[in-house]
Image (spheres, rainbow, N blue to C red):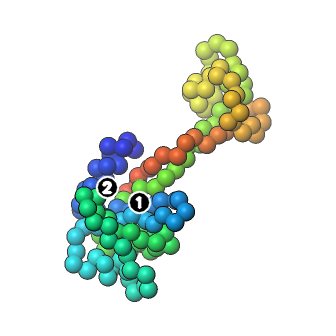
């Protein structure tokens, strides 16, 4: 999803959004439609209170361990929830493709790596299968209650 779309999802008001962060010590970031009981609803009887981070990008800071519970409860309360999370795309190719000459390519990379050689970033499983993990991106998905 393009950054513009992620920005739209983060700023829209009717559907809750949670940004799952993976760095050490980083908390979840959550945005909810306004309700007077949001703090209590988020805390859900736990000892640690959620942290309100105000300003132009106001959101709630939540411990990472609350992620699954937050998503389940948001689906129950609101019927939908957006999840923004990091992912790493896997590329699959083959040495035969990377070392190929000419334009014919029958590899799953659809010619993206055709004839480029192997720069050492590929993990070669066999002569016909190589893979690598591409840089970290953010992805967004919308979950809807059944």
Extreme top residue here?
102
Between the C-alphas of marks 2 and 1, the distance is 9 Å
Inspect this view and state whether residue 80 appears.
Answer: no
First along the sequence among labels 2 and 1: 2
Q: Residue at x 67, y 36 (%)?
A: 121
Is residue 81 shown left or right of residue 55?
right
Secondary element under disc 2, as helix, strand or loop, is helix
Q: Residue at x 44, y 86 (%)?
A: 47
- Residue 76 placed where, x, y %? 35, 74
For label 1, the residue is 19
In the rendered image, the quadrant that contains the C terminus is: bottom left
Q: Residues within 10 Å of mark 2 (few under 14, many from 20)?
A: many
Q: Using the image as rendered, state which of residue 35 and residue 25 is in the foreground.
A: 25
Is residue 140 shown left or right of residue 131?
left
Q: Residue at x 74, y 37 (%)?
A: 124
- Residue 18 placed where, x, y %? 38, 62
Q: Quadrant of residue 77?
A: bottom left
Q: Quadrant of residue 80?
A: bottom left
Is residue 8 shown left or right of residue 43?
left
Secondary element under disc 1, as helix, strand or loop, is strand
Label drawn at residue 63 = none
Inspect this view and state whether residue 17 appears.
Answer: yes
Callouts 2 and 1 close, C-beta under 8 Å: yes
Q: Residues within 10 Å of mark 1 (few under 14, many from 20)?
A: many
In the rendered image, the quadrant that contains the N terminus is: top left
Q: Residue at x 74, y 32 (%)?
A: 128
- Residue 103 placed where, x, y %? 60, 15
Is residue 53 shown left or right of residue 122?
left
For label 2, the residue is 10
Q: Quadrant of residue 4?
A: top left
């Amino acid at each position: 999803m393009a950054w513009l779309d992620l920005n739209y999802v983060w700023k829209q008001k009717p559907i809750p959004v949670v940004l799952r962060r993976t760095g050490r010590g980083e908390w979840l970031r959550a945005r909810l439609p306004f309700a007077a009981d949001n703090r209590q609803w988020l805390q859900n009887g736990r000892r640690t209170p959620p942290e309100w981070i105000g300003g132009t990008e106001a959101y709630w800071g939540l411990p990472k361990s609350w992620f699954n519970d937050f998503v389940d409860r948001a689906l129950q309360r609101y019927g939908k929830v957006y999840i923004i999370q990091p992912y790493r795309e896997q590329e699959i190719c083959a040495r035969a493709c990377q070392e190929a000459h000419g334009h014919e390519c029958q590899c799953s990379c659809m010619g993206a790596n055709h004839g480029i050689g192997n720069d050492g970033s590929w993990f070669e499983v066999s002569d016909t299968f190589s893979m690598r993990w591409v840089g970290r991106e953010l992805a967004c998905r919308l979950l809807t209650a059944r």
